[in-house]
Amino acid sequence: MKYFQNFRNFEHMNVIRLCRLEERIELAMEYWKKISNNGNLLYGILIVLSFLNQIQSMKYDYVTFTSTIKLLNLNSNARLHSHDVKYGSGSGQQSVTAVRNADDHNSYWQIVSKHGETKSIERGQPVRCGDIIRLNHLSTKRNLHSHLFQSPLSNNQEVSAFGENGDGDTGDNWIVECDDEYWKRDEPIRLKHLDTNKYLHINGDTFGRPIHGQLEVSCYHNANQYNLWRVNEGVYIKPNEENDSNDNGHTEL
């Protein structure tokens, strides 16, 4: 798997953004030649396809409904995470933490419409700043949730994962706070809990066993640097009107 690791360095987003489209394709082809000359044809094909997918994804800058993402806390450099481990105090619901391992498979969340939504939300519709959303944990199918229980370490407001197969309650609803009309993929946001008006937050407290080293995620009453988040890795669904009959409707990062 070293070729994928090398490619991750090669595709660094800042470098790609500085190149014209023709230069990006040329870079991809050069890397393809290096890989294929070493006899690693399959790796070469996969890597170039991934690279071209990234080029295509840059044509659309917004986060969209039904996309699956990882959320990075900018202050702690940790990703929002959950797993089938219950809190030993408070609500006893499924715990939500943050991890610094970028490859963690339990850090994927799907963006879905708010609990109680009656209007149809189109697949790939851009999320507006001010929209109310839910984040459904991909592995366990529970929603990012908060309520009036205290969090176990900081005694802030507890954040948990709640509901079965995405069916929860209004405690799953979060307001997207950002500065533009739409939620942009490369800009920081805050998530404000609708029921309690507190922000999704990491203050740096870490757990012991059985989730040693994972950071506590809580809700906090003030907006500050500890509750700024940005979308990182993910599979981004494009708006329907931009898809054609030969497009599978998503781009990967």
Image (cartoon, grey):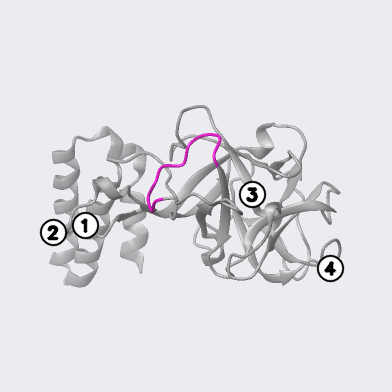
Residue at image mark 3:
173
Marks 4 and 1, Cα distance to the nearest angstrom?
Answer: 46 Å
Nearer the observer: mark 3 or 2; the answer is 3
Residue at image mark 2:
33
Which of disc 2 and disc 4 is earlier in sequence? 2
Left or right of 129? Residue 247 is left
Q: Quarter of the image holding residue 41? A: bottom left
Nearer the observer: mark 2 or 1; the answer is 1
Which of disc 3 and disc 1 is earlier in sequence? 3
Q: Amino acid at mark 4?
A: Gly
Marks 2 and 1, Cα distance to the nearest angstrom?
Answer: 27 Å
SS type, badge 3: loop
Q: Which residues are magenta?
A: 122-131
Which of disc 1 and disc 4 is earlier in sequence? 4
Marks 3 and 4, Cα distance to the nearest angstrom?
Answer: 24 Å
Left or right of 59? Residue 218 is right
Q: Amino acid at mark 2?
A: Lys
Above or below, 44 relative to 134: below
- Extreme top residue here? 179
Disc on res. 247: 1
Nearer to us in this view, 165 or 218: 165
Marks 4 and 2, Cα distance to the nearest angstrom?
Answer: 54 Å
